[in-house]
Amino acid sequence: MSNWFPENVSTFGTDVDGVFWLIFYITAVWFVLTEGLIIYFLFRYRRKPGQKAAYILGDTWNQLAWVLVPLAIVVVLDVLIDIRGADVWAKVKGQRPPAEIVVLTAGKQFNWEFTYPGPDGKFGTPDDLKLDNELHVPVGKVVHVKLTAKDVIHSFFLPHLRLKQDVVPGREITAWFEVTKPGEYEIPCAELCGFGHSGMNGRLYAHTAEDYEKWLKERWSAEK
Ligand SMILES: [Cu+2]
């Protein structure tokens, strides 16, 4: 059933999908079980001549068990999801591996603005390279994107990388990822940000190491 999702091309994508499927299967089984019981009881205990409904107060352990046993199961399953989810959260949002490439990313109505430091490796200098809706990275490297918003709240979404991070005015939030497969992937905005929101869609170009070097040479030196 994994083909419901776009292909995963990030190092942590499998973990994120794992939490999704864990929650999906737990809730699916639970849904079928409880709805099935409701339908079964509906027929099994339907009104029949000569049979009167009992008024149950739940004051014996036998009756209370109908509430307490499912409650205990739900709590155990919930803790299971929490433990697994916390692990993945720590990996994706908690401990960031050190950056090999840093790109400043600004969300604005209705574009993603990416800024590279240029040949001097420093931001805020005249050789900075600014691109609209084009994020170029090499595969197999840890990329940090420093996310800011110029107007309203946006959300930086890389569906193929299982990464989504709100972009909030007045804050700089760093997200990270490492792409595993070269290709072109979309970067939609995932937070309704105004009239042009649906058209706010950047592109992630994941290059092989050699192609990325080539791109750097062409673009960074060309745009002095
Ligand atoms: Cu938006």
Image (cartoon, rainbow, N blue to C red):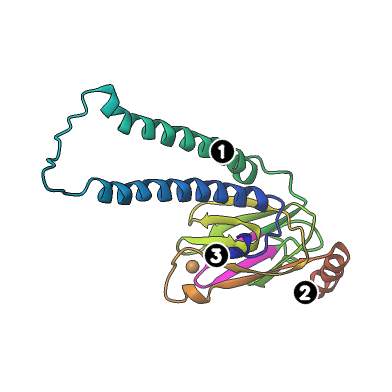
Q: Residue 26, image x and y in percent? A: 49, 45
Q: Nearer the viewer, mark 1 or mark 3?
A: 1
Give the SS element for disc 1: helix
Q: Earlier in the sequence, mark 1 or mark 3?
A: 1
Count numbered badges in the picture. 3
Q: Is 104 above or below relative to 215?
A: above
Q: Is 36 above or below relative to 58?
A: below
In the image, taking residue 52 as reference, residue 29 lies left or right, namely right
Range shown magenta: 104-115
In the image, taking residue 174 as reference, residue 25 lies left or right, namely left
Which mark is on residue 86? Answer: 1
Q: Is mark 2 within 8 Å of ligand 1?
A: no
Q: Depth check: 104 or 181 in front?
A: 181
| Quadrant in which residue 10 is drawn | bottom right
Q: Is mark 3 within 8 Å of ligand 1?
A: yes
For disc 3, the marked residue is: 107
Query: For the residue carrying disc 3, how many other residues have a C-alpha within 10 Å: few (<14), some (14-19), or many (20+)?
Result: many
Q: Residue 190, image x and y in percent? A: 50, 64
Which mark is on residue 165? Answer: none
For disc 2, the marked residue is: 223
Quarter of the N terminus within the rendering: bottom right
